Image: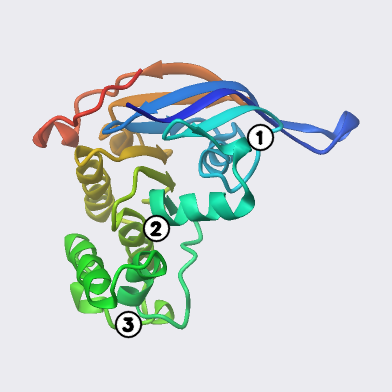
């Protein structure tokens, strides 16, 4: 099953001679259970691809489908509901709520979707434990280091029954050991049937993916399977890249 599909997606910012073509006719599909890494130089369109895939931004041209549903046919409220229930998004700036503890931040999407507080907190704690943050669960974001805040954001993205996981440089503030822990958690989510797309500049982290997509000047320049890496220590994912 194809969870995410981009068909001829383009994005232009501005008009006339000052227009910036961030994406140019991108075709991309990600199957349930597959993890795709997106790489490319600064300004190649990687982050724009993620925000459009996650319905945070509309393309100028083309179509985006999540779970077979065309996003352009959905109302703003329906898109918000889709993001809350089905899409986990890891932002570069974390987007944690300062007035909530780490555990409360992780559990919040589940509670907003009607899951009971106790069950939501239990799921949140399990995700925090996987990332070595159980002892930081009661701390507020400003009491955490940058790397700890990033891991809390990862835990919030993977908790619950998400179908699509989008991560923008999820290991940017982490050392190699914690970076591998983050990718292991994403890989585990994909083994449950989640489709994952991760933007990274780190070839070692990209080696966790089933497929690497290279962007240049807003276009797909190449797609390839990564070299053998840490993911070979885990059971293979259930999905196949296209």
Of marks 3 and 2, the one in the foreground? 3
Can you tell which mark lies on residue 173?
2
Q: Residue 88: where, in percent of width, then height? A: 40, 51
| Front residue of 129 and 58 | 58
Vertical order, 16 against 141 (above or below): above
Q: Which residue is drawn at 34% across and 76% down?
A: 104
Q: Residue 169: where, in percent of width, then height? A: 43, 47
Pointer 3: what residue?
139
Vertical order, 125 against 138 (above or below): above
Q: Is mark 3 on a helix, strand or loop?
A: loop
| Front residue of 67 and 237 | 67
Q: Which residue is drawn at 20% across and 42% down?
A: 192
- For residue 187, side relative to residue 217 (left or right): left
- For residue 14, side relative to residue 79 (left or right): right
Q: Residue 83: where, in percent of width, then height? A: 47, 52
> In which quarter of the view is residue 191 placed?
top left
Pointer 1 local density, CA inside 10 Å: few below 14, some 14–19, many at least 20: many
């Amino acid at each position: 099953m194809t969870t995410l599909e981009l068909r001829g997606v383009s994005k232009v910012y501005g008009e006339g001679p000052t227009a910036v073509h961030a994406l140019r006719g991108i075709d991309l599909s990600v199957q349930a259970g597959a993890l795709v890494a997106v790489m490319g130089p600064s300004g190649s369109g990687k982050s724009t691809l993620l925000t459009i895939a996650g319905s945070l931004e509309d393309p100028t041209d083309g179509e985006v489908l999540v779970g077979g549903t065309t996003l352009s046919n959905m109302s703003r409220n329906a898109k918000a509901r889709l993001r809350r229930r089905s899409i986990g998004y890891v932002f570069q700036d974390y987007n944690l709520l300062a007035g909530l503890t780490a555990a409360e931040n992780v559990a919040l999407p589940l509670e907003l979707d009607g899951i009971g507080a106790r069950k939501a907190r239990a799921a949140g704690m399990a995700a925090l434990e996987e990332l070595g943050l159980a002892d930081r669960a009661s701390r507020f974001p400003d009491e955490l280091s940058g790397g700890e805040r990033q891991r809390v954001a990862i835990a919030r993205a993977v908790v619950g029954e998400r179908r699509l996981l989008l991560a923008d440089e999820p290991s940017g503030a982490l050392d190699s050991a914690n970076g591998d822990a983050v990718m292991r958690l994403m890989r585990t989510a994909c083994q449950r049937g989640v489709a994952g797309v991760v933007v990274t500049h780190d070839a070692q982290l990209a080696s966790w993916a089933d497929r690497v997509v290279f962007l240049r000047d807003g276009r797909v320049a190449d797609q390839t399977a990564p070299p053998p890496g840490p993911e070979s220590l885990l059971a293979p994912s259930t999905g196949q890249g296209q």
